[in-house]
C-alpha cells in the first residue's frame, strides 16, 4: 500500500469555514475530501480502507456527531485509531483543549486559523503518521523473531538502528503495533536529546527548517558525539519484558513531557514521551535525571 | 479377868492380817480340813482357827462351836498371839487371868485352852489354831508338838491362800488390762529398744491394716512413714527430762499396709518389765481431726478473706473494760496492716471524723439505752490520714441485771458507694439546675390511667401552679388545639417504634403560645395494654424563633445564590458564545486574507491592503481574547493551578517569544542573572503577566531603548521588576494605569493595545497572592518606568 499520496478529510458544519480550510489545504498541495458533520465523516471513513485518509481535521462543535465524539469513535476502531485527528474550534478555552488532547487528538487548532500553523501541524502529523505507519508495516514483515530471548543487551547510535531494534523488540510484545511507536519514540529521544544534545527548542527550529535528519547525521560524525551510544537492556520472563534504555547525555526534565502540556500543545513536536507513556506499557519509569528509562511491557 | 495386851507391832500386824483377805470370807474346806483333823486327833470338842482383829476375833474355821466371832478383850487368843509357843491353859478356873472370864463362868463354861499362834507369810502373828474343852485337860509334850505342826499347817494354808489370791488378783488384773487393750481404740504397740514389735492390740491391726503376725517380730519402722526408731528414743529422753510422768504426745505420720500415709498422734513411754526395757507406743489416727482442723482453718481464712473482699470487719467492745477487738477486716478498714492486739475503745473513737463524733455517740447511746439497733454511717480518718465512709451495725449484750456488757458489730467500708451517692446527689442537683436553665423538664405518663408525673421545670414551661396535680388530661388541655392531632399521631407511631418525638405548641393559661419539644420512650407494660411514656419536654420557643429567622435568611440567601448562579451561568454562556460568534467571522476574515496573501500575482497595493486586513484582524483577535479573558477573570471563572514555578524559565520563554517584537522596535531585552528563584504561581498566567509587562516595556519604549528584567528577595516574596527606558508616566496618569480600557492618551497612536492588559495582570497577580506596583520618572534626565510584581516564594526555597 502506498503512503506517498496523503489524503486529508476536512470536516466543518460552517460552509465558510469548510471552504477556507479546503482552500488552505489545497493551496498547500494536499488532496482532500470534505464532510459537513461527524456522522457524514464517519460514514466516509468507514466506507474506505483503513489507511485511505492520512489525516482528519474536524471542527468540534457540529450537529449530529461532533468532533470529539468522532475522535472517540475512531480511537475505538483498532484499524483506524492510528489516523491523526486534528480538532479545530472557535472555543479557545483551556478545558476543552485539554479534553480533546486527552482523548487522543493530535492537535487542537483554534479559530481563527493561522495558516502557517495549520501547515506546520499537518506536516508534523503526516510525518508522525508516515513514520509510525512505516514502522507498523515493517513490523508486519517480521515473521521470525527471537522469541526465546530472556536477556539481551544492545548498543546503538543511529535513528535507523533504533528503528530496527524497536521493531525487533516490539515483535515480542503483546500489542506490537502500539508498543513499537512508544519504544521507537523513547529510543530516538535517547539519541536526539540524550547523546546528541539537541534541545527542545533546537528541534523545534530544525523541524521548522526541515533540517532535523541532516543535523542528526552531522552530529553523529562530530567529535564529542560520535563515540556515544545508547544501551538497551532486555530482560524477559513469561509475562513481561523489561526494557532499559540508557543514553550518555545530560539528562532532562522528564516530568514535563509525560503528559500533554498546554504550553507545548501547539508545538510541532514534543509528544514522543507522552505517546510512549500512553502506548500501553505496563509501566514506564525515568531515572538518573532522565538518562535512563525503564519500561515494563506485556509479553506476547 | 485380864484383857490381853496389844502386841508391840499391832498396826503392822493388822495390815498383815487384812492383807490376807481372810476376814469375813466364805468357809474354806482347806482350813476346815485342819480343824476337823485336830478335833479327831486331840479329841477336843472345839477347834478353832481364830484371826485376831482390832476389836474381835473372827473364826476362819470352827468345829464344835456355833458363833462366828467373839470380842477380843475377853479372848484367850488375844493372849496367845503375844508369844511364840503354844499358849496352854489346862484349867481356866485355876488361872487368875481367866478364872472370872465370862466364857469360863458362863456358857459355854470353858475349862481348858491350847492355842498355837499362826503367822502370816510376812511373820506377823495374826491369829491362832486353838483347842477348847469344857473340862480341864492336859496335853502331852507329843501332843503339844503336833499342835505346833498343825499350826504350821494353818500357816501354809494361809500362805497358799495368799498365793492363790494373788494369782487370782493377777489374773483379774491381766484380764482387765487385756480387756482394755483389746477394746482400746488407740493402737498400742510395745517394742523392744531395738525396734522389734513384741505386742500389738487389735486397734493396731485396724489402724495399720496388718495382721498380728505381720507385726510381731517386725521392725516398728514398718508402720511409720519415715524410719522412726531414733526419734522414738529422742522422745523418750524428752519424756524423762520433762519428768512429770505423763507421756508426751507427738504428731507423726504413719503408713498403712496399703501405702496410705496419714497423720497420727503418738505417745511414747518406757517401762521396765523384769529388768527388760519395753517401749509402749500409743497411736491414734488424727486424719479426721486434721481434716476438721483444716476445714476450720479454711473457714476462718475464708471468713477473713470475705471480710476483706467485702470490706467488712467485725468488732467487739467490752463495755466493762473498754477493751476493743478488731478482726483483720476491721483493722484493714481503719488502715492498719493486720489484727491489732490490746486495743482500747479510744482507738476507734479517735478515728471518727470530728464532724461525725456526735452522730456516732448518739447512735451508741440510743442502742444502749433504747435497745435500738446500732446502725450508723459516718466518716473515719484512717491510719494513713485518708478519710473514708463506713457503715456500722451492731448490738449490745446485757448481763442478767440488764447492764450492758458488750457491744458486737460489723464495720463496712462504704466509701466508694457513699461517694458515688454524694456525687450522684450533686449531679442530680446540677442536672436540676441545667434543666431549669435549659427549660428542660422530665415526665412520665401512664396512658391507661391518665396519671402523669411532672418535674418542677415543666410547671414553669406550662405556666401552671405547682400545687396542681398534673394528669394526661391537664396536659392535653394545654396543647394548642391545632396540634392535638400531632400528639395522637406520635403516640400511634410510638406504638410501633417505641419513640415519642415531636414538636408542638402549647397555650399557657395567660394565652401565650410556646413551642415545646417532647422526646420520650414509649413502653408497653406486661399487661399488653398500658403504655408508659418516660421522657423530656423542652421549651424551644426561642430556638424555634431563631430557627425561623435562620430559615428565612437561608431562603433569601438561597434565592440570592440561585439568582447569582443564574446570572453567572448566563454570563459564562454569553462569554462562550461571544467568543465563538466573534471568532467565527474573524476566522473567515483572517483565513481568506492569509490564503490570498499566498497568491504571487498580487500587486503591492493589494499586498499592503491584505497586510492591513491581517494586522487589523490579529489586533481584533487579541482584543477579543483579552476582553473575554478579563470578563472571565472578573466573574471569577478562572481556575488557577498554583505550583512551584522556576522564574527563570518563564522569563526566558517570554523573552524568546518577544524577541521578534523587540527586534522590530530596536529595543534591547536584558535579563539579570539573579532570577533563579522558584515561586508559587500559575505558570501560564504568570507568563501572561510577564508578557504583558515586557511587551508594554517594548511598545512604549524609545528607539534603541532597553527593557530590563531583574528581581529581588523581599522576605518570603520575590519582587520581579520590568524596567523600561521609555518616556515615563506622569503621576496623574499613573492613577488610571490599572483602569480598564484606559490607554492614557495612546488611543490614536500607532501603538496597538486593548487597554486592559494591566488590569488583567493586576487581577491575576492578586489572585496568585502577590501585588503589582509601578514607579515612573518623567524627568528628561531619568526617564523610564518600572513595573514590579511580587510573588510568594516556593516552600522549598523558604527552607533553604
Image (cartoon, grey):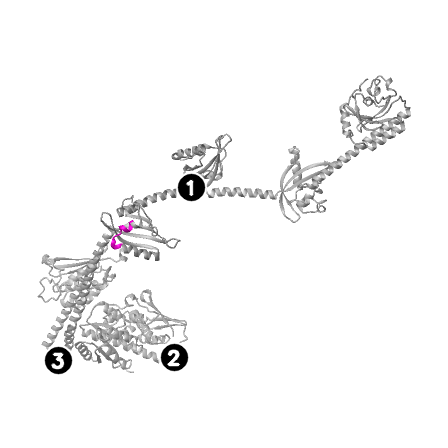
In the image, residue B171 lies at what x, y percent?
A: 75, 37
Q: Residue at x 44, y 40 (%)?
A: B412
The residue wearing badge 3 is B601
Tell me if residue B477 is in the magenta stretch. Answer: yes
- Distance Cα–Cα, label 3 vs label 1: 118 Å
Element at badge 3?
A: loop
Q: Is residue B239 above or below residue A226?
A: above
Can residue B402 be seen in this snapshot?
yes
Name the residue tied to disc 1.
B414
Quarter-wise, where is residue A111 in the image? bottom left
Q: Do labels 2 and 3 share a chain?
A: no
N-terminal of the pair, mark 3 or mark 1, is 1
Task: Measure the C-alpha gap from mark 2 to mark 3.
Answer: 57 Å
Position of the N terminus of chain B, as image quadrant, is: top right
Q: What element carries label 1?
A: loop
Q: How crowded is mark 2: few (under 14 residues within 10 Å), some or many (20 or more)?
A: few
Which x, y percent locates residue B255?
64, 46
Q: Is residue B691 left or right of residue B63?
A: left
Judge whether A288 appears above or below B63 on screen.
Answer: below
Q: Is residue B250 above or below residue A49?
A: above
Where the C terminus of chain B falls, by quadrant? bottom left
Q: Give the range drawn in magenta.
A: B474-483
- Of residue B578 and residue B18, the one placed in the foreground of this image is B18
Q: Read off the chain for label 3.
A: B
Residue corresponding to mark 2? A144
**Which subunit holds the residue at mark 1?**
B
Q: Toward which corner of the image does residue B51 lie, by quadrant?
A: top right
- Residues at discs 1 and 2 in contact (Cβ within 8 Å): no
| Position of residue B435 in the picture relative to residue B349 (left or right) | left
Mark 3 vs mark 1, foreground winner is: 1
Q: Nearer the viewer, mark 1 or mark 2?
A: 1
Rendered location of residue A145, percent (x, y): 38, 78
Amino acid at each position: 500500500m502506498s503512503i506517498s499520496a496523503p489524503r486529508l478529510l476536512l470536516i466543518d458544519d460552517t460552509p465558510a469555514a469548510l471552504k477556507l480550510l479546503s482552500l488552505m489545504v489545497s493551496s498547500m498541495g494536499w488532496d482532500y475530501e470534505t464532510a459537513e458533520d461527524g456522522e457524514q465523516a464517519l460514514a466516509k471513513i468507514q466506507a474506505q480502507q483503513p489507511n485511505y485518509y492520512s489525516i482528519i481535521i474536524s471542527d468540534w462543535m457540529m450537529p449530529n456527531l461532533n468532533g470529539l465524539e468522532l475522535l472517540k469513535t475512531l480511537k475505538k476502531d483498532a484499524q483506524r485509531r492510528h489516523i491523526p485527528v486534528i480538532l479545530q474550534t472557535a472555543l479557545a478555552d483551556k478545558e476543552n483543549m485539554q479534553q480533546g488532547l486527552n482523548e487522543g487528538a493530535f492537535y487542537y487548532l483554534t479559530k481563527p486559523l493561522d495558516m502557517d500553523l495549520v501547515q506546520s501541524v499537518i506536516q508534523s502529523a503526516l510525518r508522525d503518521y508516515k513514520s509510525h505507519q512505516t514502522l507498523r508495516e515493517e513490523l508486519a514483515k517480521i515473521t521470525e523473531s527471537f522469541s526465546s530471548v530472556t536477556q539481551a543487551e544492545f548498543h546503538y547510535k543511529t535513528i535507523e538502528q533504533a528503528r530496527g531494534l524497536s521493531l525487533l523488540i516490539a515483535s515480542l510484545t503483546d500489542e506490537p503495533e502500539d508498543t513499537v511507536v512508544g519504544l521507537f519514540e523513547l529510543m530516538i529521544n535517547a539519541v536526539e536529546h540524550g547523546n546528541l544534545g539537541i534541545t527542545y527548542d533546537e528541534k523545534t527550529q530544525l523541524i521548522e527548517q526541515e533540517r532535523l535528519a541532516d543535523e542528526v547525521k552531522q552530529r553523529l560524525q562530530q567529535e564529542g558525539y560520535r563515540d556515544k551510544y545508547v544501551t538497551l537492556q532486555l530482560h524477559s520472563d513469561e509475562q513481561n519484558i523489561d526494557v532499559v534504555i540508557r543514553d550518555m547525555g545530560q539528562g532532562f526534565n522528564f516530568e514535563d513531557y509525560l503528559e500533554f502540556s498546554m504550553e507545548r500543545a501547539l508545538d510541532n513536536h514534543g509528544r514522543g514521551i507522552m505517546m510512549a507513556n500512553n502506548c500501553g506499557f505496563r509501566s514506564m519509569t525515568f531515572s538518573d535525571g532522565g538518562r535512563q528509562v525503564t519500561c515494563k511491557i506485556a509479553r506476547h | 479377868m485380864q484383857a490381853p495386851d496389844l502386841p508391840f507391832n499391832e498396826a503392822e500386824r493388822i495390815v498383815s492380817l487384812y492383807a490376807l483377805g481372810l476376814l469375813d470370807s466364805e468357809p474354806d474346806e482347806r482350813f476346815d480340813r485342819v480343824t476337823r483333823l485336830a478335833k479327831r486327833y486331840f479329841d477336843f470338842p472345839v477347834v478353832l482357827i481364830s484371826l485376831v482383829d482390832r476389836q474381835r476375833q473372827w473364826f476362819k474355821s470352827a468345829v464344835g462351836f456355833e458363833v462366828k466371832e467373839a470380842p477380843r478383850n475377853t479372848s484367850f487368843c488375844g493372849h496367845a498371839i503375844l508369844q511364840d509357843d503354844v499358849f496352854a491353859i489346862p484349867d481356866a478356873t485355876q488361872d487368875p487371868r481367866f478364872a472370872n472370864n465370862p466364857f469360863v463362868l458362863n456358857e459355854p463354861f470353858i475349862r481348858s485352852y491350847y492355842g498355837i499362834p499362826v503367822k502370816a507369810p510376812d511373820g506377823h502373828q495374826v491369829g491362832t489354831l486353838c483347842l477348847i474343852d469344857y473340862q480341864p485337860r492336859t496335853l502331852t509334850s507329843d501332843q503339844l508338838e503336833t499342835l505346833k505342826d498343825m499350826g504350821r499347817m494353818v500357816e501354809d494354808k494361809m500362805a497358799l491362800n495368799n498365793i492363790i489370791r494373788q494369782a487370782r488378783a493377777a489374773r483379774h488384773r491381766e484380764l482387765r488390762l487385756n480387756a482394755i487393750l483389746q477394746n482400746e481404740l488407740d493402737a498400742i504397740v510395745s517394742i523392744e529398744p531395738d525396734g522389734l514389735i513384741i505386742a500389738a492390740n487389735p486397734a493396731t491391726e485396724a489402724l495399720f491394716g496388718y495382721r498380728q503376725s505381720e507385726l510381731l517380730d517386725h521392725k516398728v519402722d514398718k508402720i511409720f512413714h519415715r524410719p522412726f526408731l531414733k526419734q522414738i528414743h529422742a522422745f523418750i529422753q524428752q519424756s524423762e527430762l520433762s519428768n512429770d510422768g505423763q507421756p508426751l504426745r507427738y504428731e507423726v505420720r504413719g503408713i498403712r499396709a496399703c501405702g496410705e500415709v496419714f497423720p497420727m498422734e503418738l505417745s511414747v513411754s518406757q517401762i521396765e518389765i523384769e529388768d527388760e526395757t519395753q517401749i509402749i507406743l500409743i497411736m491414734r489416727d488424727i486424719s479426721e481431726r486434721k481434716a476438721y482442723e483444716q476445714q476450720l482453718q479454711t473457714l476462718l481464712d475464708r471468713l477473713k478473706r470475705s471480710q476483706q473482699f467485702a470490706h467488712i470487719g467485725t468488732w467487739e467492745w467490752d463495755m466493762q473494760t473498754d477493751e476493743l477487738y478488731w478482726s483483720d477486716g476491721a483493722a484493714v478498714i481503719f488502715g492498719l496492716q493486720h489484727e491489732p492486739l490490746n486495743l482500747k475503745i479510744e482507738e476507734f473513737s479517735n478515728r471518727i471524723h470530728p464532724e461525725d463524733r456526735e452522730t456516732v455517740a448518739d447512735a451508741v447511746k440510743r442502742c444502749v439505752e433504747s435497745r435500738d439497733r446500732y446502725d450508723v454511717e459516718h466518716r473515719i480518718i484512717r491510719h494513713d490520714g485518708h478519710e473514708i465512709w463506713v457503715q456500722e451495725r451492731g448490738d449490745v449484750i446485757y448481763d442478767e441485771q440488764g447492764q450492758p456488757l458488750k457491744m458486737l458489730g460489723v464495720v463496712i467500708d462504704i466509701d466508694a458507694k457513699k461517694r458515688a451517692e454524694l456525687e450522684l446527689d450533686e449531679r442530680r442537683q446540677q442536672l436540676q439546675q441545667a434543666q431549669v436553665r435549659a427549660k428542660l423538664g422530665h415526665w412520665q405518663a401512664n396512658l391507661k390511667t391518665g396519671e402523669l408525673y411532672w418535674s418542677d421545670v415543666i410547671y414553669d414551661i406550662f405556666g401552671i401552679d405547682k400545687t396542681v396535680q398534673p394528669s394526661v388530661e391537664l396536659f392535653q388541655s394545654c396543647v394548642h388545639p391545632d396540634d392535638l392531632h400531632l400528639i395522637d399521631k406520635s403516640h400511634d407511631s410510638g406504638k410501633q417504634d417505641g419513640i415519642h418525638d415531636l414538636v408542638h405548641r402549647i397555650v399557657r393559661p395567660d394565652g401565650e403560645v410556646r413551642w415545646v419539644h417532647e422526646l420520650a420512650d414509649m413502653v408497653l407494660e406486661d399487661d399488653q395494654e398500658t403504655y408508659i411514656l418516660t421522657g423530656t419536654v423542652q421549651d424551644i420557643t426561642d430556638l424555634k424563633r431563631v430557627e425561623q429567622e435562620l430559615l428565612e435568611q437561608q431562603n433569601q440567601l438561597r434565592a440570592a445564590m440561585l439568582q447569582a448562579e443564574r446570572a453567572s451561568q448566563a454570563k459564562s454562556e454569553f462569554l462562550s458564545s461571544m467568543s465563538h460568534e466573534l471568532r467565527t467571522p474573524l476566522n473567515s476574515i483572517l483565513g481568506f486574507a492569509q490564503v490570498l496573501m499566498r497568491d504571487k500575482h498580487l500587486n503591492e497595493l493589494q499586498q499592503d491592503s491584505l497586510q492591513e486586513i491581517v494586522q487589523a484582524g490579529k489586533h481584533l483577535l487579541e482584543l477579543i481574547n483579552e476582553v473575554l479573558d478579563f470578563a472571565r477573570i472578573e466573574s471569577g471563572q478562572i481556575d488557577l493551578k498554583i505550583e512551584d514555578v522556576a522564574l527563570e524559565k518563564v522569563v526566558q520563554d517570554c523573552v524568546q517569544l518577544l524577541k521578534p517584537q523587540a527586534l522590530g522596535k530596536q529595543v534591547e531585552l536584558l535579563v539579570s542573572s539573579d532570577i533563579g528563584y522558584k515561586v508559587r504561581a500559575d505558570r501560564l498566567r504568570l507568563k501572561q503577566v510577564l508578557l504583558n509587562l515586557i511587551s508594554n516595556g517594548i511598545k512604549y519604549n524609545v528607539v534603541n531603548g532597553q527593557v530590563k528584567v531583574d528581581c529581588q528577595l523581599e522576605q518570603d516574596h520575590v519582587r520581579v521588576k520590568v524596567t523600561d527606558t521609555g518616556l515615563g508616566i506622569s503621576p496623574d496618569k499613573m492613577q488610571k494605569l490599572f483602569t480598564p480600557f484606559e490607554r492614557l492618551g495612546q488611543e490614536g497612536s500607532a501603538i496597538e493595545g486593548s487597554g486592559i492588559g494591566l488590569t488583567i495582570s493586576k487581577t491575576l497577580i492578586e489572585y496568585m497572592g502577590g501585588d503589582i506596583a509601578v514607579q515612573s520618572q518623567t524627568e528628561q534626565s531619568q526617564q523610564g518606568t518600572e513595573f514590579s510584581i511580587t510573588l510568594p516564594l516556593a516552600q522549598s526555597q523558604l527552607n533553604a
